[in-house]
Image (cartoon, grey):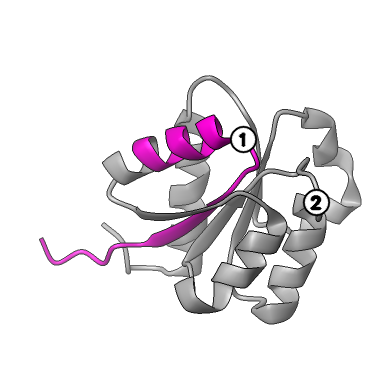
Amino acid sequence: MGTQKYTLMVVDDEENIRWLYKEELEEEGYSIVAAASGEEALQKLPEVNPDLVVMDIKMPGISGVDTLVKIKEIDKNIPVILCSAYGDYKQDFTTWASDAYVVKAASLDELKKAIREVLEKRYPGKGK
């Protein structure tokens, strides 16, 4: 096939969401590493070196927004998509550092589209 496989890190405190994202995104051809918290994501970041991070905002411990800030301090080039059940965060200027913002929905179509667009913009010509 000759296509480069992207590694995505999925960060969500809900196990069923992590499982759903992993299943759906692996079907799209991505390699998925899951983290249950912002702390776990920051711990795994150096060893995983993901091409993109998909992260929930509301999590116990360090929030997704605070984790986003720390990820950008570590490597400002790692794209981060914030994914929340709460659309009102979209107006919060602290989420603007993210590369995309997706409101959680039953269908992952919007998230998959955002992932493709962000990856294509960040790594032109690398993907399919």
Q: Are marks 2 and 1 in contact (CB under 8 Å)?
A: no
Q: Position of residue 80 (x, y in %)?
A: 62, 58
Which residue is painted at 51% across and 61% down in the image?
52
Callout 1 amino acid: Glu
Which residue is painted at 77% across and 29% down in the image?
86
Callout 2 amino acid: Ser
Q: Position of residue 50 (x, y in %)?
A: 48, 67
Q: Nearer the viewer, residue 54 or 88?
A: 54
Give the residue at mark 1.
14
Question: How many discs appear?
Answer: 2
Q: Nearer the viewer, residue 36 or 119?
A: 36
Q: Nearer the viewer, residue 82 or 58?
A: 58
Which residue is painted at 65% across and 41% down in the image?
13
Q: Which residues are magenta?
A: 1-23
Q: Is residue 91 left or right of residue 53?
A: right
Which residue is painted at 80% across and 51% down in the image?
63
Q: Nearer the viewer, mark 2 or mark 1?
A: 1
Residue 63: assigned label: 2
Mark nearer the N terminus (2 vs 1)? 1
Vertical order, 87 against 94 (above or below): above
**Which image quarter is the N terminus in?**
bottom left
Query: How far apart in space, not on screen, are marks 2 and 1 (Cα)?
Result: 14 Å
Vertical order, 2 against 101 (above or below): below
SS for tag 1? loop
Say which quarter of the image contains residue 22: top left
